[in-house]
Amino acid sequence: MFESDLLADKSQQPLISRLQREDLKLQITKGLCRSERLIVLLYYYEGLTLKEIGQVLELSESRVSQMRTTLIKRLRVRMQGREHELAA
């Protein structure tokens, strides 16, 4: 066992991980309108179904599905544009 192993503060790992997840959530939802942001947060972070999200937004399940599909395509394009930033 190394001295650094004894001194390492393992309690910080969950905090860093939580902060990274929060930062990612902010980056993903940045620039989205209210309903788009809710779709992302409710579907991917809260685990609601498209039908449940439709009830919250007062939209049909089909419309929420269409919005999510369009949103995913936009986010993919945005993230592809940032790949070179992440690689640097």
Image: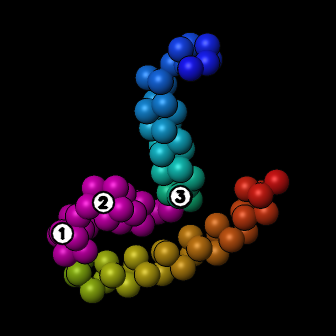
Quarter of the figure with residue 87? bottom right
Q: Which mark is residue 1?
A: none
Quarter of the figure with residue 11? top left
**Crowding at label 2, few (<14), some or many (≥20) Cα neighbours within 10 Å?**
some
Secondary structure of the residue carrying tag 3 is: helix
Residue at point 40% right, 79% down?
67
Real-space Cα separation, disc 3 to disc 2, in angstroms: 13 Å
Between 4 and 37, the residue placed more toward the observer is 4
Q: Is residue 38 among what the camera can see? A: no
Magenta stretch in the rendered image: 32-57
Asked if labels 1 and 2 touch by Cβ distance under 8 angstroms, the answer is: yes
Secondary structure of the residue carrying tag 1 is: helix
Mark 2 / mark 1, whichever is N-terminal: 2
Q: Which residue is mark 3?
A: 28
State whether the magenta stretch is mostly helix, strand or loop. helix
Real-space Cα separation, disc 3 to disc 1, in angstroms: 21 Å
Residue at point 56% right, 70% down?
75
Residue at point 45% right, 38% down?
18
Q: Given the image, on which type of amino acid does mark 1 rest? A: Glu
Real-space Cα separation, disc 2 to disc 1, in angstroms: 9 Å
Residue 20 x %, y %: 53, 42
Q: Which mark is residue 42?
A: 2
User: Residue 39 magenta-drawn?
Assistant: yes
In the rendered image, the vertical position of residue 14 relative to residue 64, given as above or below: above
Q: Which residue is mark 1?
A: 52
